Amino acid sequence: MTIRLHFVGSVAVVTVDRPGALNALNFQMLEEFSRSIDEIRESHAAGVVVVGAGDRAFCAGADVVELRGRTPEQHRGGADFGQQAFAKLADLPLPSVAVIRGPALGGGLELAMACTYRVAISGAKLGLPEIKLGLIPGYGGTQRLPRIVGTEKALEMITSGRAISADEAHQISLVDDVVPEGDAVEIGIRYLHTVSNGYPASVHLARQAVKAASTLDIQAGLQLEAKLFARAVETSDAREGMQAFVEKRAPEFQGR
């Protein structure tokens, strides 16, 4: 197996495990990744951490050797499958974080961008270098990067193919934090606890509302917000949160 899944408490940890090839993605890995996300969806996980195996790379991109000699139809099918695999991660009803050590290039950055959050360890490099091979990103890079950093910056990164530092990535909001060297899984779990406040059920509802803001006009977005707010109020976690506030104590959320 080149994609490993294990659980640390309520957090699912997905490891891209091909360190001898800088964790480069091949089609077998995409299939294993897709199955892992299906397993997470059926589990009781409250969050997901995605890391690369070893200390050299998060994921150096797609396995270019595997791409040679394929027909246009095969390339289209491969791109569709990669996009679908990463969309499964993006569409999970729970927060996810990619912890990036070393390079996250091409498909590796596309994988990271499918996560809710990205945390870079100092020294990380991020980029979409496909243009240097006469290609363009095919696993969602042309669509997710502009939504994160804006059209002009995304176009510059994609057409130049240059890799940027962790600090520059933080400046343009491609990563949410830059941290010193440490255990990637522990970094990811700590970050999820920080941004998810104990993983109340409302995290999923908040993600739905914010993601819709990029596709809905303001009136439709406000209507969706009101609908999701009403659903949040009816959760057990909301009742616990409000009761804890009245009793001046920390809430004990159950994710329901």
Image (cartoon, grey):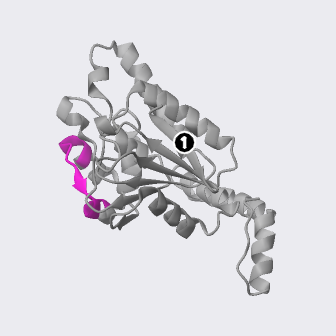
**In magenta segment, residue 20:** no
Question: Residue 80: percent from the left, percent from the top?
Answer: 46, 26
Q: Is 238 situated left or right of 114 in this image?
A: right
Residue receiving disc 1: 5
Q: Is 136 situated left or right of 15 in this image?
A: left
Residue count near mark 1 (Cα–Cα under 10 Å), binned few <14, some 14–19, many ≥20: many
Residue placed most toward the observer, 73 or 18? 18
**In magenta segment, residue 168:** yes
Q: What element carries label 1?
A: strand
Residue beneath the point at 73% across and 84% down: 249
Question: Residue 116: percent from the left, percent from the top?
Answer: 50, 54
Looking at the image, can residue 86 be seen? no
Looking at the image, can residue 214 be seen? yes
Image quarter of residue 11: bottom right
Q: In this view, does 131 lie above or below 109?
A: above
Quadrant where the image shows the C terminus: bottom right
Q: Main secondary structure of the magenta part?
A: helix
Q: Give the range drawn in magenta.
A: 157-169
Question: Residue 94: percent from the left, percent from the top?
Answer: 61, 53
- Amino acid carrying label 1: it is Leu
Residue beneath the point at 36% across and 53% down: 100
Image quarter of residue 61: top left
Residue beneath the point at 63% across and 57% down: 9
Question: Residue 178: percent from the left, percent from the top?
Answer: 35, 65
Residue beneath the point at 25% across and 59% down: 123
Residue placed most toward the observer, 36 or 83? 36
